[in-house]
Amino acid sequence: MFNTVQEFFNVLPLAIIGAGIVISLLIEMYSKKSEMLLPWFSVLLFLAAGLHSLYYVGDVSIVLQNMIATGGNVNVFYTIFTFGAAIVCLLSIDYIKKYRTYFGEYYIILQSSVLGMMLMAAAKDIFVIFLGLELMSVSFYILAGMNRKKLNANEASLKYFLLGAFATGFIVYGIALIYGSAQTTSIDFITSNFADLTKNLLFVAGILLFLIGFSFKIAAFPFHMWVPDVYEGSPTTVAALFSTGGKAAAFSAILATLFALFNGPNGNLFTPYLAVISVLSMFYGSIVAIAQTNIKRMLAYSSISHAGYLAIGLAAGNHDAVAGIIFYLAAYTFMNLGAFGIVSLLEGKDETNLNINSYAGLGNRKPLLAALLSVLMFALAGIPPFAGFFGKYYIFIAAIKADLTWLAILGVISSVISVYFYLRIVVLMYFKTSENDFVIESSNSTMLAIIFSVLVIILLGVFPGTLIDLITKFI
């Protein structure tokens, strides 16, 4: 009896979100004030799950017949997903009113996508990863086209669905080959018998197909083709979720399934593949971002380059890399949420003010907003003392320890290139005069979300060791 209670307590974050989805459905069906209640209920729901995960991070166990892991870095991922989703809810409150696109299912689908992310991070069985992936992906396809009156939103949703389904095909085929050669889908069994399993060509092919499928999900080159159009066409707050929670969930699944495999005697088996997509993603994202005039497309290409930096950690395949990847994902989540939050605030009706030149003179008109955006751009560029710098630092150090110094050097060069398009925004805000004086609507909930994101980035930059020590304790 005690064990059953303890198991339930350990999976409480999942239970909180699951129960929240049911309650949200009832609020939407029976309350006339659902439009006002649901966003704040969602925020409280995510914060409750996130704070529980953070408080009980030390309760490490494997529950539900060895299908779900709890505690440790699983809870760190839970905190990233739930806090990130809470920020997306705050950003969405006034953004939805701006476009008059309130649909009751918006927050319910948002909650469902987070539940999928959490399942992916906690999985100890490949089928649980697939279950979480599909729950998250189907929710994302709907969210991309939530602004259904806009043609490019419908286009974004369809493109995301078609290419996402294509990527899922790779993953399913990979799982089939892994199961066929290993006779099980248990991640622990596959990990402990990895050396023997790699002698089977079908198993290696299965792992490679699995990696290729997830390369789509993390938006790595050359599987990135959906990213710019989907980010541009989707509602800005939804694009913020895709670029942060979706990417973090995909990396959590790769770490859960494959990272232990990279530590064995055959640890370098997939390093060539990971190193190549890392280099291509970093340079392609950084170089093409320079040519963008739409800020959402610029952030989309920036997202591809960040996937490349994170892939350096996967290629390094050591304990330092795991810590670096999780730290980087935490920092990147809040950096990108803050940036997309400011874009959503400045964005006018009918998707106006999305051109980078719209930000000219913002330093004089809205000093606080310009200062916050400057901090976010510095952090994304990897300039100290912000969290983005330490995220890259830990991953580059892991690469050097894995004798991949050349990869770390290429990462530094790519970072230097990316400084140009991030600082271009800062130069426009403070050193150019505005040609188009548009009205900037105020939003307390959006400002709260942006300020919280910036504070997290500063705190992670000033005290990076706090999070890194927590992560390394459970590797």
Image: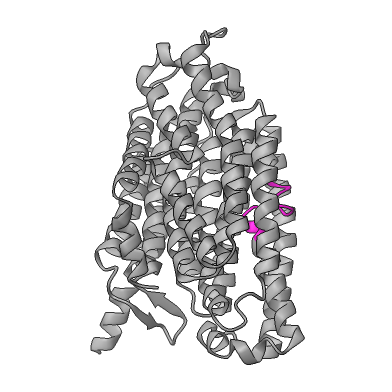
User: On the rendered image, what quadrant is the C terminus found in?
Assistant: bottom left
Q: Quadrant of residue 69?
A: bottom left
Relative to the observer, which residue lies in front, 358 or 284? 284
Residue 401 x/y as whole percent: 50, 66
Residue 32 visible in the snapshot: no
Q: Residue at x 35, y 30 (%)?
A: 447
Residue 135 x/y as whole percent: 56, 63
Q: Main secondary structure of the magenta part?
A: loop
Residue 421 x/y as whole percent: 59, 30
Residue 110 x/y as whole percent: 48, 51
- Magenta segment: 215-227
Q: Residue at x 53, y 34 (%)?
A: 101
Q: Residue at x 41, y 49 (%)?
A: 390
Q: Quadrant of residue 455?
A: top left
In this picture, residue 173 sits left or right of residue 68: right
In this picture, residue 391 sits left or right of residue 177: left
Residue 466 visible in the snapshot: yes
User: On the rendered image, what quadrant is the N terminus found in?
Assistant: bottom left
Q: Quadrant of residue 189?
A: bottom right
Relative to the observer, which residue lies in front, 424 or 357? 424
Image: 178 above or below 301? below
Residue 158 shown in magenta: no
